[in-house]
Image (cartoon, rainbow, N blue to C red):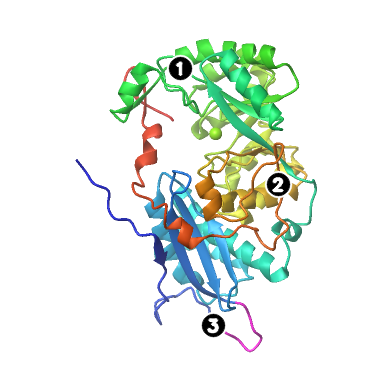
Amino acid sequence: MTTSPDLPFALTAPEPEDGVVLARAPWDTGLIDADDTVRITGVTTFLTAPQGCPYVIVRVETNVPGLYGLGCSSDPQRTLAIASVVNDYLAPMIIGRPAADIEDIHRLLLNGGYWRGGSIANNALAGIDVALWDIAGKRAGLPLHDLFGGRARDGASAYTHVDGFTAREIADKVIAATERGYRHVRVQVAVPGTDTYGTAAKDAAEERRRHLREDRWDSLSYLHHVPRVLAEIRELVGDGVELLHDSHERLTPAQARRFMAEIEPARLFFVEDLLAPEDADHFAEMRLAGSTPLAVGELYTEASQYTRLFTTRSIDFARLRIPTLGGLTTTRKILAAAELFGVRSAPHGPGDVSPLGQAANVAMNVSSHAFGVQEAAGFREATLEVFPGAPVAREGVLYPSTEPGLGVDFNEAAARKYPVTAPGQHDRWALLRATDGAAQRP
Ligand code: MG
């Protein structure tokens, strides 16, 4: 039997030693200048799990008493690695720099590892980037969306998740969600004998497999079962609600073409991640197989993966994950490009995106004409306690904070009550195998 290591709660980056930090510019030698420049004086990461999944929270301190910024670096699959990148590699490069130089610091950190990008490096960068935007908003006394040009809409329409085995069971949950005000609902269908993404419903065989840390995937069962149930759900709920579905990159291009044809009767708002990133060149041909809009990009780590699909008019919605894309600075550029190509956004926002990450989403969403819909898993009471000001949907809409910056704070004392005990525990759902035992994309 293995035991979990004792994990730290807070990790503070050390002050860089003289002569070690080559990135510090010659003009950038003192922490406080004659002109009262606001400078970065420290970076601390916090590991906490009030939502169940591990969060990596970044706090950037300044030389102004009480002025700090907060950001979300959370990737529940690689928690400790991200915290290390923030503390051991990025923080020493920015301590002493002007907190207002967001664009410069973003580019510096992006290039600073030479081999740029990737999920771990980008998540680490994102925590700092969003924290610097938080500081900028606090200094200006403005909520973040006002720094981004002001409101293009009152609030961000959100979608919630429902799942189940039968059409009736799922339709009842959709109707319940509409009664709470949601106009968009993601529906995931459990398939007997196979682990279908996003469904809590498990049969006995699946429960046994869970003890082996291994789930089974059967494309044939999915293709046979899910389109039929989606069509039945549409019949049961009528056309007054938008239905969404996530295929989670599990199908081959040939299977996906068939799926596109067979889900037509469900009249979905979009189908998400129909293909894996490796198969992205097939998205254009998916349009010929059916009319369901395509939402793509949750796994993407760089802008070029989107712009290729924008310029070939291959997708309808860009799934944007602010932490994985390196923060608001990158993501807002992708969003601006999306607008120019008639693509709308559908930012990632399940429970593993912390309230700080969700607040960044909301600020971005309400200030862009390209916004489509925001994923929004409900936060637990514990999470709301740790993050005062966390965005909470009202009648299916996330409204931006009117407080300066992100409008979300971090209660360190409350966060200590929810330690990250096993940072690898969330890998289990990704350990998927096909019917012949081959490793399967999750
Ligand atoms: Mg997804």
Residue 429 pos. (x, y %): 40, 32
- Residue at 58% x, 40% y is 378
- Whether label 3 touches label 2, CB < 8 Å: no
Counting other residues with Cα less than 10 Å from the Cα at mark 1, is it few (<14), some (14-19), or many (20 or more)?
some
The span picked out in magenta is 28-38
Q: Quadrant of residue 176?
A: top right
Whole-angstrom CA distance, mark 1 to mark 2, is 35 Å
Q: Which residue is mark 2?
A: 365
Question: Which structural element holds mark 1?
Answer: helix
Residue 321 pos. (x, y %): 57, 45
Nearer-N-terminus badge (3/1): 3
Q: Quadrant holding ligand 1?
A: top right
Where does the N terminus fall, quadrant-wise?
top left
Q: Which residue is mark 3?
A: 31
Question: Which structural element holds mark 3?
Answer: loop
Q: Is residue 281 left or right of residue 179?
A: left
- Residue at 40% x, 48% y is 78
Q: Is residue 222 above or below residue 377?
A: above
Amino acid found under the numbered disc labelled 2: Asn
Where does the C terminus fall, quadrant-wise?
top left
Q: Which residue is mark 1?
A: 219
Whole-angstrom CA distance, mark 3 to mark 2, is 35 Å
Q: Is mark 2 within 8 Å of ligand 1?
A: no
Nearer-N-terminus badge (3/2): 3
Amino acid found under the numbered disc labelled 3: Leu
Counting other residues with Cα less than 10 Å from the Cα at mark 2, is it few (<14), some (14-19), or many (20 or more)?
many
Residue 66: tell me if it is visible: yes
Q: Is residue 212 left or right of residue 273?
A: left
Is residue 30 located in the magenta-colored stretch of the structure?
yes
Provide the major secondary structure of the magenta segment.
Answer: loop
